[in-house]
Amino acid sequence: MTSKTVLNETHRALGAKMVDFGGWDMPIHYGSQLEEHHQVRRDVGMFDVSHMTVIDLHGEQVRAFLRHLLANSVDKLQKPGRALYSCMLNPQGGVIDDLIVYFMREDWFRLVVNAATRDKDLAWITAQAAAFGVEVRERPEFGMIAVQGPNARAKVIALLREEDRDPVSRLVRFSACEATTADGVPVFVARTGYTGEDGFEVIVPDTETVAFWNALLAAGVKPAGLGARDTLRLEAGMNLYGQDMDETVTPYEAALGWTVALDPGRDFIGRAALEAQQAAGVPRQMVGLVMDEKGVLRHGQKVLTDNGEGEILSGTFSPTIGKAIAFARIPAGDPGQVRVDIRGRQVPVRVVKFPFVRDNTVQPGI
């Protein structure tokens, strides 16, 4: 049975092309994926991300629990509202999921996890929480809208009541606060996103999500589908769970070593496996690729390096750059001249640092 967000009928009324995405009936585009991509890069667009899972953790030992659960250190979160990106690992160091954790109070932290991994994540988190006496509460009564682009913050702030506009305008990146709209609706506004542009992800009661979406629409914010979201996040150098990493891949093999905090005295799940991999040498690396020839890089294509074969993970044509780009996992070490096998033809590609694009600017070397 396909799941539907509270905005499903709204998408259909707007003429969206709907597809199955991890068991959810979601809009891929509303007419032109390319136009929606550029709209977010240059102005502002909004995405229905109500399929994402919000989990609230309550109890005296929540911080201790998260120190055990996550590879990144929640001790970095000392001010209420601050957020942290982290992977949640299995004992072998593989990525169960990547998520964002928000520090609300010492006895309340909020997680936002991926939609396709909802059941697995809830079961894992609940099982690990038992020893800490932490209450794990899913919040299905919320919708979520991501408003992204250089003009995104102004559009959201204009919909808030007067006294909340200044506090929300002063949010730094990776922080959040509770606010109220001009219509009296309580919302949770986070300065986070998945596009490489500035903006907010706004958690709204599901009974008010359609009205909030329509208010944004009336303010000139155009809807964007999952197609544009995918090309935007790949340009921004952001991993997609299940495609770029999974339970067989460690953060070090997914270019996510920066999310691992090996702080002394903290024995998080998977730490021993990561330390052993580091000591032995990480066998695989994730790199960015740009193809200067015409064509498209796609998931599953074979990548040929001086050290052996790898494969394309996420690949697309980049609307901002005008060339094909990709993530690839290849053997460790200097790869030499890299080629991609496209229908039997070995096409040269360049290995580059990502992100490819940030704040509507193609990054140096791309």
Image (cartoon, rainbow, N blue to C red):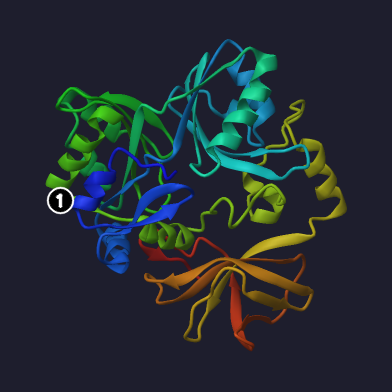
Residue 366 seen in this snapshot:
no
- Number of callouts in the render? 1
Task: Please name whichever residue, 350 or 295, is drawn nearer the observer in this view of the structure.
Answer: 295
Q: Residue at x 59, y 39 (%)?
A: 86
Q: Is residue 187 left or right of residue 192?
A: left
Splitting the image into 4 quarters, where does residue 191 fall? top left
Splitting the image into 4 quarters, where does residue 69 fall? top right
Q: Is residue 361 left or right of residue 83?
A: left
Q: Position of residue 37 (x, y in %)?
A: 32, 63
Q: Position of residue 252 (x, y in %)?
A: 70, 51
Splitting the image into 4 quarters, where does residue 39 fall? bottom left
Q: Residue at x 27, y 35 (%)?
A: 169
Residue 136 seen in this snapshot:
yes
Q: Position of residue 134 (x, y in %)?
A: 59, 15
Give the farthest residue toward the right. Answer: 280
User: Judging from the image, what secondary structure is the residue with disc 1 in?
Assistant: loop
- From what the image shows, is residue 173 above or below residue 57? below
Q: Is residue 343 left or right of residue 112?
A: right
Q: Position of residue 286 (x, y in %)?
A: 65, 61
Q: Is residue 176 left or right of residue 86?
A: left
Q: Residue at x 74, y 43 (%)?
A: 93
The crowd level at tag 1 (other Cα within 10 Å; few <14, some 14-19, many 20+) is: few
Dividing the image into 4 quarters, which one contains the N terminus?
A: top left
Q: Which residue is mark 1?
A: 220
- From what the image shows, is residue 32 above or below residue 133? below
Please, what is the three-letter code of the amino acid marked with disc 1? Gly
Task: Please name whichever residue, 168 or 3, is drawn nearer the observer in this view of the structure.
Answer: 3
- From what the image shows, is residue 237 above or below residue 336? above
